[in-house]
Image: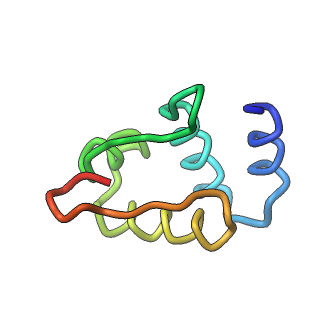
């Protein structure tokens, strides 16, 4: 399953930086269900120490490409 996801990410028309971040997020995913529970700060670090605003933009790109669904529970976790 992971191989198919990596191929879908690599073949997408996302900007290169979003592809890199998609692969970084995939590396954090639970192997059985694909879920990730993480703070915005932790995700920004996983994306290479970018700002939270920039992290949100990358997440919006990933969601627009139907690669992920995410939500924030209001206490800094997503």
Measured as percent of width and height from the top left, residue 6 is found at: 75, 39
Residue 7: percent from left, percent from top: 83, 43
- Could you say where residue 66 lies in the image, as x and y percent from the top left? 67, 65
- Please say which color scheme the image uses: rainbow
How many numbered marks does the figure carry?
0
Q: Quadrant of the C terminus?
A: bottom left
- Quadrant of the snapshot with the N terminus: top right
Q: Is residue 10 left or right of residue 56?
A: right
Q: Residue at x 55, y 31 (%)?
A: 27
Residue lying farthest left? 75
Say if 55 sits above or below 21 in the image: below
Of 57 and 74, nearer the camera is 74
Q: Quadrant of residue 48?
A: top left
Decide if residue 34 is on the left or right side of residue 41: right
Q: Position of residue 65 (x, y in %)?
A: 69, 68
Write down the quadrant of residue 31 in the picture. top right
Q: Residue at x 24, y 52 (%)?
A: 77
Residue at 29% across, 60% down: 51
Residue projecting furthest to the front: 33
68 left or right of 57? Answer: right
Residue at horizontal 51 percent and vertical 30 percent from the top:
30
Q: Is residue 14 above or below residue 24?
A: below
For this view, does 72 lie left or right of residue 59? left
């Amino acid at each position: 399953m992971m191989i198919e996801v990596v191929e879908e990410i690599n073949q997408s028309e996302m900007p290169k930086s979003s592809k890199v971040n998609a692969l970084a997020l995939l590396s954090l995913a639970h192997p059985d269900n694909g879920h990730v529970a993480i703070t915005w700060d932790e995700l920004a670090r996983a994306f290479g120490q970018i700002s939270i605003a920039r992290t949100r933009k990358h997440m919006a790109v990933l969601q627009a490409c139907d690669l992920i669904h995410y939500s924030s529970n209001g206490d800094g976790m997503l």
